[in-house]
């Protein structure tokens, strides 16, 4: 609970949410390796990273940006 509150405080303060960014990269890497780029959806990546569906667009501009 405390970690979640800390993340929320950082986000509200206008600082980038690095933890979300890092989780998205890590989970996407695993999923892309296992299923390929076309075999993975944005929703699957976000679910695995425990992130909002809009997080990939926010951090990377879309699935292709995350893949790069």
Image (spheres, rainbow, N blue to C red):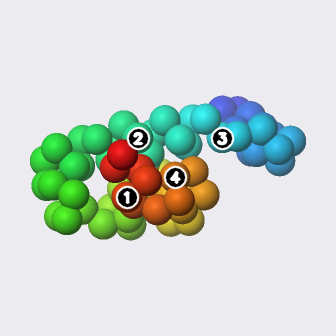
Say if mark 1 contacts mark 4, CB within 8 Å. no
- Residue 9: % across, % down: 81, 40
Residue 66 makes an appearance in the image: yes
Cα distance between the residues tagged 1 and 4: 8 Å
Q: Residue at x 57, y 51 (%)?
A: 59
Q: Foreground residue, 6 or 16? A: 16
Earlier-in-chain disc, 2 versus 4: 2
How far is disc 3 from disc 4 in space, using C-alphas?
A: 13 Å
Under circle 3, the secondary element is loop
Neighbourhood count class around disc 4 (C-alpha, 10 Å): few under 14, some 14–19, many 20 upward = some
Residue 61 versus residue 8 in the image, above or below: below
Describe residue 4's horizontal placement relative to residue 21 as left or right: right
Residue indicated by mark 4: 60
Q: Which residue is mark 3?
A: 17
Is the residue marked by circle 1 packed among few (<14), some (14-19), or many (20+) residues within 10 Å? few
Q: CA distance from mark 3 to mark 2?
A: 13 Å
Give residue 57's position: percent from left, percent from top: 54, 62
- Residue 27: x and y in percent read 34, 43
Could you say which disc has been placed on residue 64 in the image? Answer: 1
Q: Earlier in the sequence, mark 1 or mark 2?
A: 2
> Within 10 Å of the Cα at label 2, are there few (<14), some (14-19), or many (20+) other Cα atoms?
some
Image side of residue 2 versus residue 39, left or right: right
């Amino acid at each position: 609970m405390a970690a979640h509150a800390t993340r929320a405080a950082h986000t509200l303060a206008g600082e980038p949410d690095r933890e979300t960014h890092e989780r998205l990269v890590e989970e996407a890497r695993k999923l892309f390796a296992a299923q390929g780029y076309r075999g993975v959806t944005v929703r699957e990546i976000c679910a695995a990273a425990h992130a909002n569906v809009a997080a990939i667009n926010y951090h990377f501009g879309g699935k292709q940006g995350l893949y790069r």
